[in-house]
Image (spheres, rainbow, N blue to C red):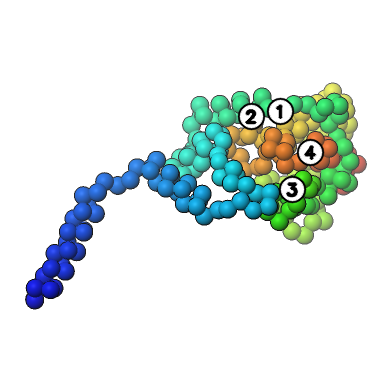
Amino acid sequence: MNRKHTLALTAIAAVLLTACATPMPSSADLDKLAQDIAKRSFRAQGQVKLDVLNQDEDNRLCSEADTNGTPISEANAKAIEARNLKTIKPPSDGKYLGDFKAGEKVAQSGRGLTWTDKEGSENGGNCYNCHQISKTELSYGNLGPSLYNYGKIRGVTDPTNAAAKPIVEYTWGKLNNARAYNACTNMPRFGHKNILTEKQIKDVMALLLDPASPINK
């Protein structure tokens, strides 16, 4: 082995020894690195701004639990649900149900909140992406449970009746801020994050609960 090869091997060995001596980065360091990479990789365009990369406290806690591969602690889950439950307000006019035909249009539409959508344009709920709602729908997701016969199964024959109040209020809350009932749910917080308007949520309520809605037939 000549001197040139000896020097090269010595240099490689030095690099390997340095790497072995360097402590492994902590989980916090890796998280910060990932966040820095994400911020450098995204750019603001159209209505989508860089603030979409900022997690609120609830998202942070759920993301950390998911990254660690362990369920979120019971204490954190209860705290998240309690915080989000406080954000839910009843409809401004006291009426929970709108037009189920309009609700079906909201459920079908997946538009909104992307950089190609005009800022201020009406969003959709994209409900079929996660749920079966109608038996006539050919394609739907299964991330969430089937909502077919949602009101019928729960015995809602008259949504204005006092007996139906618990399920009506629960459904309203679930559509507005699902984290009030399931801390790390994948369901969008439609009302809390201003994804859907109050009218749109009322229309989806009617789709789910109005006995005249096709899904309850």
Say whether residue 160 is visible: yes
Measure how far apart labels 2 and 1 are at the Cα level: 7 Å
At x 42% / y 48%, what residue is drawn?
33
- From the image, tell me which residue sits under label 2: 84
Task: Tell me the tag on residue 88.
Answer: 1
Say whether residue 174 is visible: no
At x 21% / y 54%, what residue is drawn?
18
Q: Vertically, is 203 above or below 142?
A: above
Report if the CB atoms under discs 4 and 2 are less than 8 Å apart: no
Q: Residue furthest right?
A: 212
Measure how far apart labels 2 and 3 are at the Cα level: 26 Å
- From the image, tell me which residue sits under label 4: 197
Report if the CB atoms under discs 2 and 1 are less than 8 Å apart: yes
Which class describes the residues within 10 Å of circle 2: few (<14), some (14-19), or many (20+)?
Answer: many
Task: Check disc 2 and give the amino acid type.
Answer: Asn
Front position in the image: 69 or 106: 106
Task: Check disc 4 and give the amino acid type.
Answer: Thr
Front position in the image: 110 or 137: 110
